Amino acid sequence: MWPTQAAELHRDNNSASVLLRDAPQEDFLVETRLTFDGTRGNQQAGLVLYENDDRYLKLAHTVLPLNRKGGQFLHVTEFGKEAERPTTTPPTAVANGPMFGAAPAATTWLRLYAQIDEANDEYDVRMASSTDGEHWQWGGTWSLSVRGDLRIGLVSMNATGATAEFDYLRTYAMPDDAATGPALDVTVQPRCLAGRAYVAVRATNAEEVPVDVELVTPYGSRSVADVAPGSSAYQAFTVREGAAPSGSVTVRGTATLAGDELTSSSEHGFDGLDCG
């Protein structure tokens, strides 16, 4: 565990308070325990890996207002990224994107696992959350190109009236082989059969224990329990039209590894196919 470092309190113009300290210059995992009593839309609190107000990754317990349902809210674990998006036309100077993990509780443990990808000069950061501090649900990964030094922070932001209590902030050096969830070998292939389009998804269990697998596509989903080592979960999802536009598939795997229940999540793109 890394020792506590000097911290600073940063406030921006978006009703946010961020307590920051320097991040390690190697792979690391940061963890906190958060008790949060949010009751209004857009209240949120959690962890942040922060470079500046336009470049950061945030893992938070967030309260979202429900559309057309006044006074009703949804509590989510939100893993957000704010940074440039050079792949758009024209390139976007500052873009914000969310992904979501397992549902939070009144008290939620949060983790960010940061790995340095030297070949691509970027940080690959994966999220996890737990409602008991023992069983962790691992979620998606954001990549952030290296431009400046990252700082680790605790953040509360966007709307007043809630209290966020952080019991601790711990940072751990991580070995290269640290396990973050079950490994799955995934193939996604659009196909034509009798003039109809299908998206075939296969996820093969690369672990030595059974894995629960979930395949999620724009055309439906399938869950398969206890996929044996070396075996696969498979489904050919029917596209109602005669063509399948390009898209992506999410594959999740859940298994007990080294005594912890861990979940991996990965996205896999596929090219469009016209069967007309």
Image (cartoon, grey):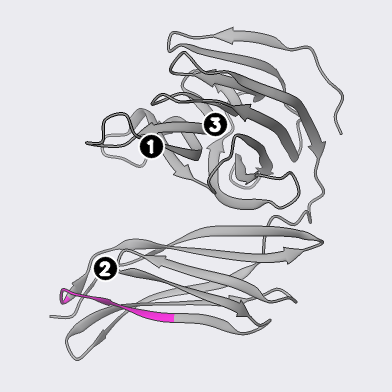
Which residue type does callout 2 highlight?
Gly
* Location of residue 10 by image quarter: top right
Q: Quadrant of the C terminus?
A: bottom left
Image: 230 above or below 95 = below
Which is nearer the N-term, disc 3 or disc 1? 3
Spatial separation of the CA atoms under disc 3 and disc 1:
20 Å
Mark nearer the viewer, 3 or 2: 3
| Extent of the magenta region | 235-242
The crowding category of the residue bearing disc 1, from other C-alpha atoms within 10 Å (few below 14, some 14 to 19, many at least 20), is few
Mark 1 = which residue? 86
Per the rendering, the mark at residue 272 is 2
Image: 261 above or below 157 = below
Spatial separation of the CA atoms under disc 2 and disc 1:
23 Å
Magenta stretch: includes residue 165: no
Mark 3 = which residue? 58
Mark nearer the viewer, 2 or 1: 2
Percent from the top left, x then y, of residue 219? 30, 68
SS for dot 1: loop
Which residue type does callout 3 highlight?
Lys
135 sits to left or right of 91: right
Image: 66 above or below 211 = above
Q: Residue furthest front?
A: 71
**Which one is nearer the viewer's eye here, 13 or 83?**
13
Could you tell me if residue 149 is visible in this image? no
Which residue type does callout 1 highlight?
Pro
Mark 3 and 1 residues: CB-CB less than 8 Å, in contact? no
Q: Residue at x 52, y 18 (%)?
A: 162
SS for dot 3: strand
* Location of residue 242 by image quarter: bottom left
Which is nearer the N-term, disc 3 or disc 2? 3
